Amino acid sequence: MQNHMKECRNEGVPFLTFPELSELPQFHHAFSTRLGGISQGYLASMNLGFGRGDDEKTVLRNYKIFCHATGFPIESLVLAAQDHHTNIRRVGRKDRGAGILFPKPWQSVDGLITNDKGVTLCVFGADCVPILIVDPISHAIGVCHAGWRGTVGKIAAKTVFSMQREFGSLPQNLQAFIGPSIGPCCFEVDEPVEREFAALKTLQPETLIEKKPNGKYYIDLWETNARILKEAGVPKVTIGGLCTKCHPELVWSHRASGGKRGGMCGMLMIGEEEER
């Protein structure tokens, strides 16, 4: 699959962007890679995951390095509390710094939405699917974390419906972007997981699942989430096409590393100014 993401670099720090999203001046976004930070050992070097065995001061320093390179004020970050649920939380300027400057006051939140300027929504992954959603008309944004459980639970659609309810966003005005994550080439599962996807009858699951000779299955998380978004009314979904397991030299992959890995972060903000 074609890679629709662009690798950028500033002050020696690489990061990934969607060129189409970069063309919308009211929004600012970036995805980290595994490079450009100060972490050591198996976490080298840009680990943005707390709780991965890294010193918290080192992780915070990595955030400062990444934010400085990409233009996000570190005090603007709001971190999700991801544990494979489908809960969506609206946040605002009062929540800036949550998870960075003070502990997150929530649990089991795998999706965040806001229509406040200067609030950076953060979503994490290292094989799971990070999704960014923007509303250029109502000037609202959302992010969500879709592992296989979140995908089956249609967290992407729940994020769309939350934006519709909270901000009046019309699904037909939204654009969605599926970031670096494990691709259909590498997401191998056993039959119990396959059955969960096969039950998504409205998505034509037979075209999303490939049975392998070893009795296991490959599943296309990218296209599954794209169809969930389109079923929710989002007409434009861009799949980044960067498989984390295929590119462990650039990005973190839980499966490629056997779980000895850091965390990546996707960041999305409505800019303080209309033009950047």
Image (cartoon, grey):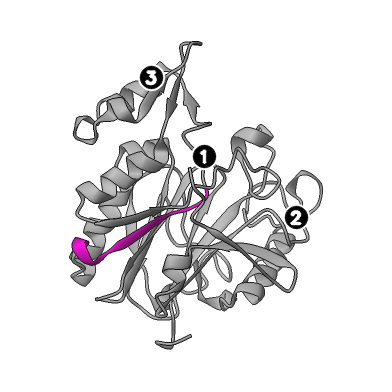
Name the residue type under label 2: Ser
Above or below residue 252? Residue 259 is above
The answer to whether residue 120 of the structure is visible from this angle is: no
Name the residue type under label 3: Pro
Residue 234 highlighted magenta (yes or no): no
Q: Marks 1 and 3: which is nearer the front?
A: 1
- Mark 3 crowd level (few <14, some 14–19, many ≥20, 10 Å Cα): few
Q: Earlier in the sequence, mark 3 or mark 2?
A: 2
SS category of the residue bearing label 3: helix
Could you say which quadrant of the image residue 147 lies in?
Answer: top left
SS category of the residue bearing label 1: loop
- Magenta span: 171-180
Q: Are marks 1 and 3 in contact (CB under 8 Å)?
A: no
Above or below residue 167? Residue 7 is above
Residue 60 position, x and y percent, is 67, 65
Pick the front one: 233 or 130: 233
Residue denoted by label 3: 192
Residue 63 tag number:
none
Residue denoted by label 2: 45
Residue denoted by label 1: 182
